[in-house]
Image (tube, helix red, strand yellow):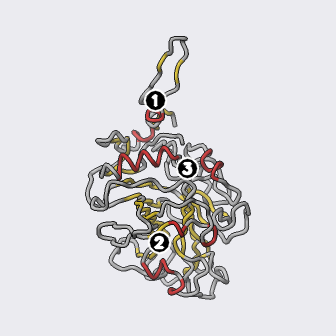
Amino acid sequence: MRKISILRHETTEPGGGATPPPAAVILVTTLIVGLLAACIPIVKTKTGVITHGDIVSNGDSIGWLLVCRPSHTLPDDPIKFPGQPGASHLHDFWGNASTTGSSTLATQEASSNDAVQNTYIGSDTAAGTSCDLSAYAGTADTASYWAPTVYADGVRIVPDDKAELYYRAKPVFNTNFVPFPQDARLVVGNHDATSVATNPALVSDALHFECDGDTAHHYTAPPTTCTTFLMIVTFPSCYDGGPMDHTGPVGTDNEHFAYASNATDGTCPSNFPISVPTLSEKFKYTVPSTGMDIEFSADPTGPMAGIPMPTYTAHADFWNTWQPAALRYLVTNCINAQISCGTNPLVPVGP
């Protein structure tokens, strides 16, 4: 698709040279003509964020939404097994399409953010992100998200085409949010769980399952009464201000984060006083029929056709490798402004 420029900034110095545009201008340098062809509305918030879709602000829409395709599938986990490609059970990845077991903060941030190629069926990776589809022409979301691969009766299930990643805050929480610390490595759930009781995220409902369209019933394992189900994961939103030293369980920074002590008003525990956005992930899966045995790649015996096994190993990972300027821009102009910034907003690049 052909890109078009929607804003040009150029300043000529006395010597005749042109100064580069500031980061605030870079964010709106390109859009994709296909956006118009697809009739996806381009809108601008009162704080100047250029975005897409509905920006009506209410108590549930403050922040922004990323719509993502699956990017790729690899036996890698750069949080638990950094520098060790192939050392993990199989994971499905969303977001930064260059993420592998060999990835580092530097390689994640350096990834070109053009639209990713359709590589998720195999194990190939390519630069770009699956969270800013070609129609949205994003420039700076280089973060990664992954979860164990799902199997139905021993056959791998490719996640549905559109995962939804919400960065939100209720209006009653406050307007003093800060971005996630750069290089934060977080995991919700327990890939070694052998029961619901040994997976705290299932106990607390920070991770649960729903039949598509039925939000009233939460399950601790993938439901087998529907052919389309969601895995919904909510990450902690309170931070203690400590360093991202990756010394927590399985190489995470989980010890520096906690859930709000009051979910109604977002009050953080006194020893985790700093508010960060609430990241909620919705991954959708469709299986051929009801009654199938649903398992995860993390299960102790692995997925085995015809041998039903209890599934308690649900988990999801988030590696914050956003371009810092982009995440800071969205927290300031969406969450702290207490407005909706729609879907896949355009953002600046830079540190």
Looking at the picture, how far across and down is residue 287, in whole percent? Answer: 51, 74
Q: CA distance from mark 3 to mark 1?
A: 22 Å
| Residue 103 picture location, percent across and down | 67, 55
Secondary structure, mark 2, is: strand
Q: At numbered mark 3, what does the secondary structure look like: helix, strand or loop?
A: loop
**Residue bearing the label numbered 2:** 231
Q: Is residue 249 above or below residue 197?
A: above
Residue type at tag 2: Met
Q: Label 1, on which residue?
A: 5
- Counting residues from the N terminus, which is met first, the one under dot 1 or under dot 2? 1
Give the label on residue 292, or none.
none
Residue 142 image label: 3
Which circle, 2 or 3, is nearer the viewer? Answer: 3
Q: Earlier in the sequence, mark 2 or mark 3?
A: 3
Circles 2 and 3: CB distance less than 8 Å? no
Q: Would you say 113 lies left or right of 290 here?
A: right
The one nearer the camera, 172 or 247, is 247
